Amino acid sequence: MNQDFFLIGIDGGGSGTRVVLGDAQGRELAQAASGPSGLGLGIERAWQSIEAGCAEAFERAGASLDWSRCVLGCGLAGVNNRDWLAEFHARAPGVAGLAVESDAYTTLLGAHGGAPGVIVALGTGSVAASLADDGECRVASGYGFPSGDEASGAWLGLRLIVHAQQALDGRAPIDDLARALLAHTGAQDRESLVVWLCAANQTAYASLAPVAIAHRTHPFAARLLGEAGGEVGKMISALDSSESLPVALCGGLGAPLREYVPQRYQARLREPLADSAHGGLQLAQREAAHLAD
C-alpha cells in the first residue's frame, strides 16, 4: 500500500457530515464535522461539505489537504438513487481512490465491527440494515423523505408540527408543546407558520425532533414516539426473522428512542462499537487495499 495515502471515512446525512482522517494503516489522526452531504440536498453541496470537513480534519492533524493522496470511504444518504450516485462520482475531485456505499452499510460496519448484526440508523432520515454470516447485506426502510424514513427526525418533525397547526386554529390547546414548536420555528401566527412550512426541508423538520423528546410526556408527543418505536420494531423483524442477531440503534435518535422499541427486541439491543464515519474508514481501507493489488 502507498504509505503516502491518507484514508478518510465520511458519514454524510441530511443534518451534517462527520469525517475521520487516518493514515495509510487506518490509524486515526483527526476528526471533523461540516454541513449536510446527503445527496438529496444536492451533489455540489455534498462535495462542498465533504471538502470542508476534510480540510478541517487535515488542519487538526497539522497537514494540508491534497486530494491526490486521499482514499475516501463514503457512507452517504441518498446513494440508492442511481442518478444522484452517478453525478456524485462524476463531480469527484482527483482523489486517489473513492468507495461509496449507503450510510446504512457504513453504519453496519462501524456498529458491529464488520461482524453479523442489525442496525437501525435514526437521524435526519432512517434506514435499517443487516449483515448475515455469509456477508449478505439487506436493507429495510430508507426510502427517503417525506414518504419513508419512518422513526427518523424528519418523520417525527413532519408529524409533530401538526400539533402547532391545530393549536393555532383552535383544534388543540396552546400548551407547552405548541409553544415550544412555535418558538422553534419562529412563528407567531398562522401566516408566519405557513411561511416556515413552505420553506422547510427534511433538515428543518428533523430539527423539531428534540422538541418531541423534551416533551415526551405530552400525549401527542408520547403517541408519536410510541409509533416510532413500533416502526423500529418492524425494521428489525423484517431483517432478522431468526430473532438471533444483535441490534444496534445508531444515529442521534438511537438512544432517545431505545425505550420505545417493543419489549420483545429489548434484550438484543447493543451499544454500537463505532459510528458510520469509522465504518467509512474501514471502507477506505478496503479500497486502498484494492488499489495496492
Image (tube, rainbow, N blue to C red):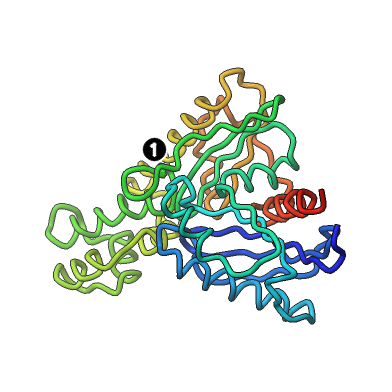
Residue 2 falls left or right of residue 49: right
| 29, 205: nearer the viewer | 29
Query: The N terminus is located in which quarter?
Result: bottom right
| Image position of 159 with respect to 46: above or below | above
Q: Mark 1 points at which residue?
A: 227
Please indicate whether residue 214 sits to the left or right of residue 99 in the image: left
- The outermost residue toward the front is 293
Please give the name of the residue rendered at 49% of the width and 32% of the height, measured from the top-left corner. Answer: 235
Instruction: Count how many numbered circles sit on residues in the image.
Output: 1
Amino acid at circle 1: Glu
Secondary element at image label 1: helix
Residue nearest the observer in this picture, 223 or 249: 249
Q: Which residue is drawn at 56% across and 31% down?
A: 138
Q: From the top left corner, tell me how far across and down residue 29 is, in percent.
A: 80, 69
**Which of these two is toward me, 230 or 169?**
230
Q: Where is residue 227 in the image (x, y as percent from the top left)?
A: 39, 38
Q: Residue at x 42, y 40 (%)?
A: 228
Q: Locate residue 280: give its quadrant.
A: bottom right
Residue 183: x and y in percent read: 32, 71
In the rendered image, the vertical position of residue 223 relative to residue 177, given as above or below:
above
Relative placement, left or right, of 269 versus 122 is right
